[in-house]
Structures are given as structure tokens and as C-alpha cells.
Image: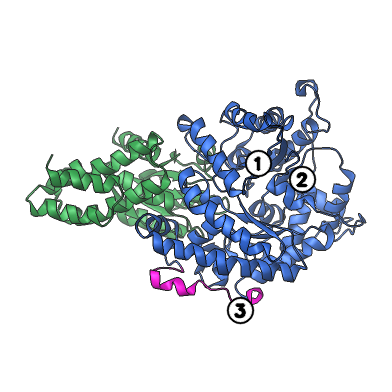
Chain colours: A green, B blue
């Protein structure tokens, strides 16, 4: 691996959101293929941060900084990627339900899903039920992910699932839920397809959901 | 110190309940009457504002704005569940930030929450916005917060004050990602932000609150944003401990003690990552936040699944010195929602078995979810009363436990109000 790619990967791992886009620009200027820059440095960097997290060597501040650096570097590279760089694993629509502003988990999930090869569309926070439905209809994602931090707002997830069903879209999209107050039991109760315990688990579950869809 | 109370226990330790006369239309007196009848069991307390709102069927736009409604519904729910302290509260993380101008989201279904998309301190020059309002009472929903406390004090006594702890308030005004980035990349700015909070904003807020309520002894600052792994133990020592100490010093001149609660609370989500050495570091950090008092919070983590032996092992160092540590042990919110009641009872029994004989245990139901079944909460309280009967039984297994069969909240309210119900 070139020195620039090594430095780019290190910037992602260390959460340096100023060095990461600079190094990404440098790598492209050196003539390296965008897909190689993305996979060997940017994705490898966020995966390394995830590994350190899973080994208790990184804590949430480290991961949130890595996610920021990942986002900054990916923003430089993604416009250069072309369709010939291979199909994405799936399209994921993500949002935090209405009345809820807590998007820390979503930020990390987006980075990990993007690093895992998914196309991720971020609907943001405080997303009304009908917006989820409209965007599912319009963008036809493989998965719609719903996040909540409060036990009051998480109850709206049930309404999102019901609205998707009522408007004839439930069979066309997998639904996963996540966020501090949610559990597998809650996901089962509201008829979701999966519960993401954390960002790494969410990526694994997303892969399973897409694989199920393909079968 | 061999009689240290938990910070929550201490918060309510001065509670001087009123006459005990029941006014059928004032649920605050239901709680007082219950409390006077209940002797000799271990304290069990709860945080449950979202649950109370749903239980009482009060709209969010009323529950989080009208102090009378909040206080009465909270008292009614506390009396219904037989808690040892009235659980009357709102969105304690937001009041100061909102009063200084932080943008909020006001929802019809949930408590107000800070809009982190546009934080109050969006850029370093915004630091000038971190100033205490000339009139706290009229700013944001401070009137709601303080009036709710005043209404509660009217019948329960008590001298507690409340606030948002410095780290959590820093998150509230800056957002977590930006604050973390500041701490790493621009620590001078981050220190300036924290300094303004502990030297100006919070002492001013607490002094005004103390004056409004007619005195105060212990101010407890909610600090869940500083729980583990939101912050590592090392970051707690670097960013929470010094400012907790400085805030304490700044408030002592007003005659009350101000301390954060739940900083460094161990909340690892992945059981495979449970690490007793990290756990011990969080406990050490908690003691430092408490200015050396032997008190630990196990409030929000998955304690029904973590092993308790490493906690006992850490506590043994204090036991060897003859010190009873103040342990606040929390039943996890998701367990309270999902149940089953038998698992909740077992969790309470394990806590008492592990901690209550050698230390001072307060049981805590951590943020009861809005839709948690009441049977689960009754089970937790009953378990604390059966197994927490004082003096403690030599063998908890000898105690015959019966799962309580209780009326619904609506039936309880009708019974206590002579069938008149309560109009929220």
C-alpha cells in the first residue's frame, strides 16, 4: 500500500477529519484508482476503528471522531466512483423518528454501513411518519432503518411499520430498528424484520436482510 | 465514613413528610400517607416521567409545561407504585440550555429535546451566548421546573435542588460530536466552555433556584452524557472531575453542595465486551467525581446480565477498611419494559444479596419506559419490600415471595379520590 493510503487510513483510524480529506485528495492526485482509495484506506480505516471498538481499545469518542473522518474522506472520493466500480450491497434509508433528535448512533451506523458497501440515504432526525413512507415509495430502498432514543418516540416506530403496511409498501422493504431503548422483543412486537443492537450488529443484520431478499 | 448514603438517598434523606392527612383530590398526600405507613424496608426510587405521562394519559404538551399537572401526576404514580421518594421530574437535561436560547424540538408525543442540528454554541465565537439570564425564572421552561419542585416540597419537605451536570450541559449547548472534537483538537476552547458553565451559568442557576425554593442542601446534577462508554474513565478524570470540583467550590458559598450523578456509570451494551478492569476504573472515577466519597452508581447498565462478582470484588477494598459504600443499583429500563416480572424480581434479589449486607444500597428503576407494563414495576417494588425488609434475613431464599396482584392505575386513582378521579 502506498504511503499516502497508509496515512489516509491512519487519519480515519485516529479520527482526524482535517487530514483525512487532504490525504484522500492527495491519493487521487497521485492517480490512484478511486475504488482502491476507498477500499484500501477509507473503508479499511473505519473497519479498523470498529475492530478497536470491539476490543475495548476504542470508546465512543474515538469512534465518533473516526466516523467524522470517514465522512470527510468519503465525500472527496464518492463523486469519483463510477458504476463500474461494482454494485453496492444494498440501499438503506435511515432516519430518527419524529420528536427525537438523538442521532449519535445513526452517525456511526451510517459510517459502518457505508464502509460495509451499502448505499446509505440519511433522512436525518425528527422525521415524520409519512416522510418515511414517501421516501420508501420514491427511493425503493432494500432496508429502512428507524432510530429512537426516547421510550416515547420509539413507539412511533410501530406507526411507521403500520403506515408502510397500510400503503402497500411493507412487502417491498425490510425494516430494522435501533437505538438505546429498543430491544429484540420490541422489534418483534411491532413487526420489524431486525433489531440492531449496535453499529456493527446493524451491518451484520443488514447483510442478512439483503441476502434474504436475494433468495 | 461508614454511613454514607447514595447520592439519590441523600437527595431525599431530609424529606420531612407532612401531616399524613389524605386529601382525596391531592395525590401528593396519597404518597405522604403511604410513606408514613411504610417502615423498615430498603429504599426503592425511580425515574419515570415518560412512564407517568403515559400512565396518567396526559398529553406531552401539558405534562412538560404545566407544573401542577406534572407534580400531581408524578405524585399519583409514585403513590400507586409505592416508591419511597416521589418521582416527579421532567427533562432535566434541557432547562438551562433552553433558557440560554438553545433551539428545541417541541413534540406532541415526547418531552422537549434539544435540536442538535443547530447547537447554541455552533462556533467558537458563540461562547458569548453562555451567560446566565438576568431572570432565570422567566427564561425557557425554568418556571415549570422550579414550580414543580416547589409543589412537591409543599407536602414532602426536602431541600434538594437539581441541575444538568457540567459535561451533559456542555453536550446540550455544543452537541456531543462537536464537543468531543473540541476536547481533542481545540482543548483551550473546550476548557473555556466548561469554565463558563461552572463559574457562571450553573452557580447562578442553582443560587436562583435555591432562593426561589426557600433553601437547599444538596443539588444533584444529571450526567448521563458522561456515562461509559460515552466517555472513557480517563476522559471522565480529565474533563468531569475537575469541573465537578470547581462547581462544588463555587456553590459552597451559597450554602449547598452540588455534585453530578451518573458520571462514568458503566453502560457497556455488548456483554462480550464486559471488562472488570474498565468497570473498576469507572468506579474509581465515580468516587473522584463524588470528591472522594465512597459512592457508586450502577444505574443504567445491563446489570441483570453483567456479573456482580467484579463489583463485590471492587467493594471489598472498602469493606476491608470498614467502609460501607453507597451503592445505587438500577434495574435496566429495557428489562422493566420487556420483563418478565420474575426476572425483575430475581434482579432485585441479586442486588440485595450482593450489596445490602455490607454496604448501603438504594434500589433504582432507571428511566421506566413509557409503555412498561405496570405489573413489572409492581414486581420490582414488591421484591424490594419482601427481600429488603430490615433487618435483612440471614438467607433470602427463606423468604416466601408472592407476586403482587394490583388494581390498574385508573382503579387506584378512583379509589383514592373517592371515585372522583383526577382531571389532568
Question: Which of the 4 quarters of the picture holds residue B403?
Answer: top right
The residue positioned 50% from the left and 50% from the top of the image is: A157
Q: Report if the CB atoms under discs 3 and 1 are less than 8 Å apart.
A: no
Q: Report if the CB atoms under discs 3 and 2 are less than 8 Å apart.
A: no
Question: Eyeballing the image, is B71 above or below A30?
Answer: below
Q: Furthest residue to the bottom?
A: B134
Q: Position of residue A194 (x, y in %)?
A: 43, 38
Instruction: Compare marks 1 and 2 and give the one earlier in the sequence.
Output: 2
Mark in the foreground, 1 or 2: 1
> Residue A163 colored magenta?
no
Question: Eyeballing the image, is B88 above or below A180?
Answer: below
- Residue B294, disc: 1
Separation (CA) of disc 1 from disc 2: 30 Å
Q: Which residue is mark 2?
A: B81
Q: Position of residue B127 (x, y in %)?
A: 45, 71
Asked whether residue B2 appears in the rendered view, the answer is: yes
Question: The disc numbered 1 marks a residue on which chain?
Answer: B
Q: Nearer the viewer, residue B22 or A118?
A: B22
Q: Nearer the viewer, residue B44 or B216?
A: B216
Mark in the foreground, 3 or 2: 3
Q: Nearer the viewer, residue B189 or B367?
A: B189
Question: The disc numbered 2 marks a residue on which chain?
Answer: B
Separation (CA) of disc 3 from disc 2: 40 Å
Q: Which residue is mark 3?
A: B134
Looking at the rendered structure, the secondary structure element under dot 2 is: helix
Left or right: where A166 falls relative to B295: left
Q: Residues within 10 Å of mark 1 (few under 14, many from 20)?
A: many
Looking at the rendered structure, the secondary structure element under dot 3 is: loop
Looking at the rendered structure, the secondary structure element under dot 1 is: loop
Asked whether residue B92 appears in the rendered view, the answer is: no
Amino acid at each position: 500500500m502506498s504511503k499516502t493510503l497508509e496515512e489516509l487510513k491512519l487519519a480515519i483510524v485516529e479520527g482526524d477529519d482535517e487530514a483525512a480529506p487532504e490525504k484522500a485528495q492527495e491519493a487521487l492526485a497521485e492517480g490512484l484508482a478511486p475504488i482502491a482509495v476507498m477500499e484500501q484506506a477509507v473503508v479499511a480505516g473505519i473497519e479498523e476503528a470498529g475492530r478497536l471498538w470491539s476490543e475495548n481499545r476504542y470508546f465512543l469518542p474515538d469512534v465518533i471522531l473516526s466516523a467524522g473522518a470517514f465522512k470527510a474522506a468519503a465525500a472527496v472520493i464518492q463523486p469519483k466512483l463510477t458504476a463500474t466500480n461494482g454494485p453496492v450491497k444494498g440501499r438503506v434509508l435511515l432516519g430518527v423518528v419524529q420528536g427525537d433528535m438523538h442521532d449519535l448512533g445513526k452517525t456511526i451506523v451510517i459510517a459502518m454501513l457505508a464502509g460495509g458497501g451499502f448505499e446509505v440515504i440519511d433522512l436525518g432526525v425528527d422525521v415524520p411518519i409519512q416522510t418515511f413512507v414517501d421516501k420508501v415509495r420514491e427511493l425503493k430502498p432494500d432496508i429502512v432503518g428507524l432510530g429512537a432514543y426516547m421510550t416515547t418516540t420509539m413507539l412511533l416506530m410501530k406507526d411507521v411499520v403500520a403506515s408502510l403496511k397500510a400503503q402497500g409498501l411493507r412487502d417491498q422493504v425490510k425494516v430494522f430498528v435501533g437505538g438505546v431503548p429498543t430491544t429484540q422483543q420490541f422489534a418483534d412486537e411491532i413487526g420489524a424484520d431486525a433489531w440492531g443492537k449496535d453499529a456493527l450488529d446493524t451491518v451484520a443484520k443488514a447483510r442478512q436482510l439483503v441476502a434474504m431478499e436475494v433468495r | 465514613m461508614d454511613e454514607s448514603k447514595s447520592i439519590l438517598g441523600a437527595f431525599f434523606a431530609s424529606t420531612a413528610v407532612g401531616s399524613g392527612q389524605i386529601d382525596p383530590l391531592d395525590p401528593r398526600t396519597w404518597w405522604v400517607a403511604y410513606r408514613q405507613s411504610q417502615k423498615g424496608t430498603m429504599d426503592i426510587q425511580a425515574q419515570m416521567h415518560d412512564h407517568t405521562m403515559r400512565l396518567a394519559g396526559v398529553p406531552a404538551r401539558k405534562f412538560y409545561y404545566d407544573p401542577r399537572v406534572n407534580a400531581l401526576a408524578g405524585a399519583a404514580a409514585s403513590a400507586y407504585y409505592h416508591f419511597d421518594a416521589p418521582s416527579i421530574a421532567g427533562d432535566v437535561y434541557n432547562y438551562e440550555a433552553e433558557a440560554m436560547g438553545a433551539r428545541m424540538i417541541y413534540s406532541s408525543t415526547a418531552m422537549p429535546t434539544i435540536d442538535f442540528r443547530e447547537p447554541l454554541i455552533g462556533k467558537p465565537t458563540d461562547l458569548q451566548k453562555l451567560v446566565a439570564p438576568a431572570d432565570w425564572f422567566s427564561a425557557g421552561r425554568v418556571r415549570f421546573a422550579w414550580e414543580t419542585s416547589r409543589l412537591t416540597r409543599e407536602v414532602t419537605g426536602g431541600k434538594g435542588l437539581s441541575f444538568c451536570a457540567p459535561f451533559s450541559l456542555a453536550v446540550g449547548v455544543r452537541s456531543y460530536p462537536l464537543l468531543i472534537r473540541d476536547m481533542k483538537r481545540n482543548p483551550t476552547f473546550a476548557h473555556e466552555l466548561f469554565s463558563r458553565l461552572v463559574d457562571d451559568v450553573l452557580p447562578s442557576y442553582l443560587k436562583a433556584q435555591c432562593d426561589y425554593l426557600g433553601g437547599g442542601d444538596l443539588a444533584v446534577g444529571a450526567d448521563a452524557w458522561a456515562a461509559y462508554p460515552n466517555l472513557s474513565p480517563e476522559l471522565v478524570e480529565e474533563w468531569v472531575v475537575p469541573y465537578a470540583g470547581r462547581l462544588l467550590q463555587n456553590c459552597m458559598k451559597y450554602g449547598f453542595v452540588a455534585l453530578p450523578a451518573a458520571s462514568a456509570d458503566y453502560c457497556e451494551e455488548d456483554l462480550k465486551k464486559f471488562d472488570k478492569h474498565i468497570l473498576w476504573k469507572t468506579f474509581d472515577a465515580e468516587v473522584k467525581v463524588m470528591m472522594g466519597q465512597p459512592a457508586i452508581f450502577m444505574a443504567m447498565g445491563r446489570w441483570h446480565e453483567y456479573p456482580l462478582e467484579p463489583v463485590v470484588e471492587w467493594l471489598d477494598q472498602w469493606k476491608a477498611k470498614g467502609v460501607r459504600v453507597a451503592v445505587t443499583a438500577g434495574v435496566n429500563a429495557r428489562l422493566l419494559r420487556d420483563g418478565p416480572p420474575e426476572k425483575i424480581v430475581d434482579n432485585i434479589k441479586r442486588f440485595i444479596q450482593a450489596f445490602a449486607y455490607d454496604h448501603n444500597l438504594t434500589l433504582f428503576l432507571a428511566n421506566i419506559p413509557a409503555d412498561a407494563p405496570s405489573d413489572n414495576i409492581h414486581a420490582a417494588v414488591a421484591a424490594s419490600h419482601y427481600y429488603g425488609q430490615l433487618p435483612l434475613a440471614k438467607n433470602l431464599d427463606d423468604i416466601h415471595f408472592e407476586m403482587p396482584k394490583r388494581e390498574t392505575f385508573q382503579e387506584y386513582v378512583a379509589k383514592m379520590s373517592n371515585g372522583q378521579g383526577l382531571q389532568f
